[in-house]
Structures are given as structure tokens and as C-alpha cells.
């Protein structure tokens, strides 16, 4: 299919140079038919592959294979989603406010010392 499309493109380039409108029209029609055929074939293959892959392989088998490959490679595999930290925003602002309070106190002591 790819070779056929490449041939049409080369022939179209030659027809454009000669400005033969009938030949250009015929080549464009051929290119459009081949492009539509390719689109149908690729969408059929995609749907077939997605149906076959998702229904043929159980999740336990996939997890087992991933674990086996990780063990062979000496990697640690964590199949669970990581837990997020829920209170980092509040902790960060608390630490920042404590630092600010300490700086304010130091400034007040320096002003009183003068």
C-alpha cells in the first residue's frame, strides 16, 4: 500500500509539471481511493487489535509478567498508585510563618538594643 501511494505521488508530481488536467484529475482520484482504503484498513486493524488485546489477556497475568520481568532485572515493582501528601501546603505555610516570626523577634531585639 505504501509503495502504491508513493507511486501515485510521483506520478502526480510529473503530471503537475506537464499541467495535463485530465491526468492530474485521474491521479488525484486514484490517490483519494487509496487513501480511503488505507483509512478503512487501519481503523479495522486498530479496532481488532484493541478488542483482541483487552479481552485475551487477564490483568493478573499482566501483573505477574511485569513482576517476573522486574525480578529478573533486579528492580522493585510497585503496582499500587503512590499515596499523595495531603497536608504539605499547611505545613509549608506554618514553617514559613514560624521563620517570619523568628525574624520579626530578632529585628525587635536589635532595635531595642540600640
Image (spheres, grey):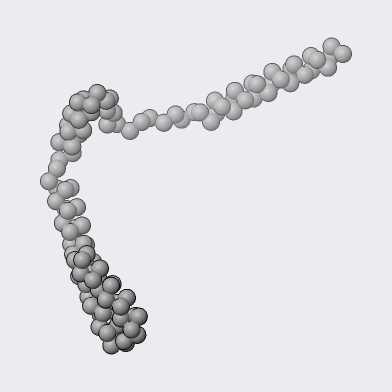
Q: Viewed as shown, does residue 108 lie left or right of 27?
A: right
Decide: is 92 above or below 1.
Answer: above
The answer to whether residue 36 of the structure is visible from this angle is no
Would you identify the image quadrant in which residue 85 lies?
Answer: top left
Of residue 38 and residue 27, the one placed in the foreground of this image is 27
Which one is in front, 22 or 113? 22
Q: Quadrant of the N terminus?
A: bottom left
The residue sitting at the right extreme is 114
Residue 81 pos. (x, y %): 33, 33
Residue 105 appears in the figure: yes
Instruction: Say above or below: 62 vs 91.
Output: below
Residue 70: image x %, image y %? 23, 28
Task: Assign the C terminus to one quadrant of the image.
Answer: top right
Does 90 appear above or below 39?
above
- Residue 14 lies, in percent from the top left, at 30, 78
**Residue farthest top in this picture:** 113
What residue sits 15% from the left and 40% below the top?
58
**Vertical position of residue 101 compared to residue 54: above or below:** above
Amino acid at each position: 500500500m505504501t509503495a502504491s501511494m508513493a507511486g501515485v505521488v510521483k506520478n502526480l508530481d510529473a503530471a503537475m509539471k506537464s499541467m495535463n488536467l485530465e491526468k492530474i484529475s485521474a491521479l488525484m482520484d486514484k490517490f483519494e481511493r487509496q487513501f480511503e482504503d488505507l483509512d478503512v484498513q487501519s481503523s479495522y486493524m486498530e479496532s481488532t487489535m484493541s478488542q483482541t488485546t483487552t479481552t485475551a489477556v487477564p490483568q493478573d497475568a499482566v501483573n505477574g509478567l511485569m513482576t517476573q520481568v522486574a525480578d529478573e532485572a533486579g528492580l522493585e515493582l510497585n503496582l499500587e498508585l503512590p499515596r499523595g501528601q495531603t497536608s504539605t501546603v499547611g505545613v509549608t505555610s506554618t514553617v514559613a510563618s514560624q521563620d517570619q516570626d523568628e525574624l520579626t523577634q530578632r529585628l525587635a531585639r536589635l532595635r531595642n538594643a540600640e
